[in-house]
């Protein structure tokens, strides 16, 4: 009898594997975060041709350096392009395991079944959190954007706004994870990727001014903290992505005037990113994703890691 062969898995690739979604259903009809709520209907109106151009610029860059899967677009799912919220692949487990989100945000509820179907086709072990935690309270989880892998079985997990604290307890109990809880206290930084960015297993970018002392000490026991200001993180500095030797972030600075309200903060963000890139042997790449800012979104929102190979 011929020996049974085991199909190669994404964990064995020598390059990153990412999930993205062509923003064909992108819309801003239901403003579901404070940034959108502070815009007028006219300010939120999407230029779909421009959005597709901006997306494909990013997609082409990533596809040259990673394996990129495209999640099929579904009509009326206005935020489906923001796949970082769809779920998380758990790299500390031997088997390829994904937990699909149980969304708090109403316009996103129908995204989960599409994700489940996709990951089943990819032969992942697919899990959906329960409706309620062990405490009997409603449980919410919004993906990789709220749960960051550091190394081994150590993660940092947000709670308090989009993801509930009992979700972190469920992850710990269900998958043998050690999670440092990070309470979201700034309504403008509504996911963990708005507050924290993992550079590598030993270094994270973090805004100390938006992190409580207990959490900060817990993170500092595990890794080095690279400082970012409140202005930096509110401008999207931690909404970044590392692919190989490249540090990717977005900024509309190429299309705004020097007198624009965002100009100085964007300039400061890029300067800080350049400093961090030099310190960590990375090369900075900036993408204009201004159409996605109308959803209160940034670059990290547009990609979900299917493995944790840096490339």
Image (tube, rainbow, N blue to C red):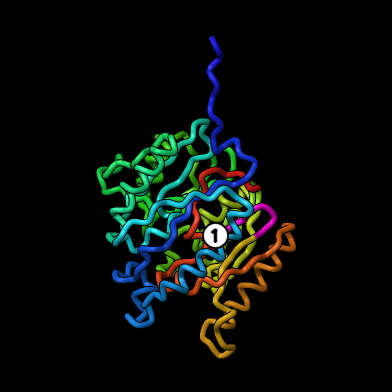
- Which element carries disc 1, helix, strand or loop? helix
Q: Residue at x 37, y 77 (%)?
A: 44
Residue 252 magenta? no
Q: Quadrant of residue 161?
A: bottom left
Q: Where in the figure is residue 277, as x and y percent of width and height?
A: 70, 62
Taking 161 as reference, is 226 left or right?
Answer: right
**In-front residue for pair 77/105:** 77
Q: Is residue 62 above or below residue 8?
A: below
Taking 258 as reference, is 141 left or right?
Answer: left
What residue would you read off at disc 1? Answer: 59
Q: Where in the figure is residue 199, as x and y percent of width and height?
A: 63, 54
Q: Is residue 67 above or below residue 105?
A: above
Q: Residue at x 74, y 61 (%)?
A: 279
**In-front residue for pair 155/102:** 102
Q: Tell me which segment is drawn in magenta.
A: 239-246
Q: Residue at x 43, y 67 (%)?
A: 186
Taking 69 as reference, is 227 left or right?
Answer: right
Asked whether residue 272 is in view, the answer is yes
Asked whether residue 182 is in view, the answer is no
Q: Residue furthest bottom?
A: 259
Residue 240 magenta? yes
Give the total number of marks visible in the rendering: 1
Q: Quadrant of residue 162?
A: bottom left
Q: Residue at x 27, y 49 (%)?
A: 138
Q: Is residue 260 above or below residue 295?
A: below
């Amino acid at each position: 009898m011929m020996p049974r062969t085991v199909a190669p898995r994404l964990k064995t690739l020598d390059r990153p594997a990412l999930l993205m979604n062509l923003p064909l259903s992108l819309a801003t009809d239901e403003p579901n975060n404070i940034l959108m709520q502070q815009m007028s209907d006219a300010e939120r109106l999407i230029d779909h041709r421009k959005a597709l151009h901006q997306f494909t610029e990013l997609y082409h860059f990533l596809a040259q350096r990673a394996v990129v899967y495209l999640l099929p677009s579904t009509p009326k799912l206005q935020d489906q392009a923001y796949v970082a919220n769809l779920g998380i692949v758990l790299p500390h487990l031997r088997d390829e395991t994904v937990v699909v989100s149980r969304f708090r945000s109403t316009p996103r509820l129908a995204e989960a079944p599409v994700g489940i179907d996709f990951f089943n086709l990819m032969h992942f072990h697919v899990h959906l959190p329960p409706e309620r935690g062990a405490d009997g309270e409603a449980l919410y989880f919004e993906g990789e954007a709220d749960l960051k892998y550091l190394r081994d079985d150590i993660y940092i997990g947000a709670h308090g706004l989009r993801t509930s604290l009992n979700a972190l307890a469920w992850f710990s109990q269900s998958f043998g994870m050690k999670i440092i809880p990070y309470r979201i206290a700034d309504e403008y930084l509504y996911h963990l990727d708005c507050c924290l960015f993992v550079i590598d297993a030993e270094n994270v970018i973090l805004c100390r001014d938006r992190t409580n002392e207990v959490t900060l000490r817990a993170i500092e026991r595990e890794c080095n903290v690279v400082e970012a200001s409140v202005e930096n993180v509110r401008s999207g500095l931690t909404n970044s992505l590392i692919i190989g030797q490249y540090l990717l972030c977005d900024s509309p600075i190429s299309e705004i005037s020097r007198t624009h309200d965002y100009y100085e903060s964007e300039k400061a963000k890029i300067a800080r990113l350049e400093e961090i890139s030099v310190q960590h042997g990375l090369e900075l790449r900036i993408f204009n994703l201004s159409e996605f800012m109308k959803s209160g979104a940034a670059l990290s929102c547009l990609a979900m890691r299917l493995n944790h190979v840096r490339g």
